[in-house]
Amino acid sequence: MTEIYLIRHTQAEGNRYRIMQGHWDGGVTATGLKQIELLAERFRDLPVDAVYSSDLYRARLTATAITRWGGQELQIDTRLREINVGPWETRFFGNVFHDEPERAYRFIRDPESFSLEGAETYAQVRTRACEALEAIARTNPGRRVAVVSHGVTIRCALSGITGIDLRDVERLPICKNTAVTHLLWDGERFHLDYYNDASHLAPLGEAPWSRNGDVRHERFDPASDPDFYKDCYADAWLAAHGDLEGFSAPGYYHAAREHYRRDPDSVLRMLVEDRCIGLLDMDTARGAHAGYGWISLVYLKPEYRRQGYGIQLLGRAYLHYQTLGRKSVRLNVAEENRAARAFYEKEGFSLLGGDGGAKGLLLMEKKLEGVRHGA
């Protein structure tokens, strides 16, 4: 009997920031690194004979949780890749759901009928995934094998193996990041032992992204509604400092107009469904010479704070600056704003030092590609 431990990759940028990441080869998150450590502990005393992975970085990095103990050569099989979503790659879920609701619904709830020019169908993924797993099983008779793949790909493979309809999300949900599925191969067919076991992640609790809704964005020209921009910045200033001393509405407004003039994708209004929840303002000229991107404003209306939306705003800044080739992002945080500082530190920002000024601003930075070094 051949054993296959089928594992979904660790938490990646697309998962955390709600980006479509089929074949997009993004990085992993700080939480993802912790998940890999817990997965490694799960396999510490479980000898594995061979390790296979998708060629995408998030899967290959996850596989190191297994290879660190036995030193196995990591074998790459591109058939284990995630579904290719074609023109949706690197688009945010909120925008896809808003712009193409019927097709997005089929992608999530009626996958057998999903089709998109330039993308794979679920049937195509099921075929290649099942072929890959059977080939791996036949190549490793009587051995214990770990296979690292992706959420939709694993679902498709399990649907083919068990006959469970992909629309049956109760019996066949998307696996959690680093969740383990145990398959037994008798030489002719697979038998499912257990599915989607993420018990090793108990120390981390629930995955930290918003369950309240996906944020979408639209370009926002500050000149189209000066009062809205000024009110957002004033409220953000007040929340950070406790008063409006030193706040200059005309100065920040005119700076934002210049940001938008240079790059219309640098000033974005954020919405959940049709409700405006906040604003993101980036100065793409600042830091260009030194390879970093500057975030001028990350703003959420008070009723939408501490609900998991903030990371989706930051995710847009990260992706935009990655696209521009920047290696990090920087921003200022008021020294007295402990809640904001704690939030940014949790998201991987480090303190570079004081930035001067009457309000005692702190300069913080997040590396955009640091976790990918050594891949």
Image (cartoon, rainbow, N blue to C red):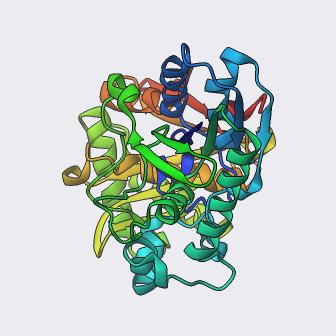
Residue at 29 percent of width and 76 percent of height: 274
Q: Quadrant of residue 243?
A: top left
Q: Nearer the viewer, residue 362 or 31?
A: 31
Relative side of 369 to 101, left or right = right
The answer to whether residue 369 of the structure is visible from this angle is no
Residue 255 image offset from top left, x and y in percent: 55, 57
Q: Position of residue 357 (x, y in %)?
A: 48, 27
Q: Quadrant of the N terminus?
A: top right
Above or below residue 318? Residue 227 is below
Q: Taking the image as drawn, is residue 163 in sight? A: yes
Q: Is residue 118 left or right of residue 268?
A: right
Does residue 131 sit above or below 328 in this rendering?
below
Residue 212's x, y, as percent?
A: 26, 57
Quadrant assignment for the C terminus: top right
Q: How many marks?
A: 0
Q: Position of residue 229 (x, y in %)?
A: 38, 63
Query: Which residue shows up at 68% across the image and 65% down it?
Result: 128
Q: Nearer the viewer, residue 356 or 133?
A: 133
Front one among 100 and 51:
51
Drawn side of residue 325 relative to residue 10, left or right? right
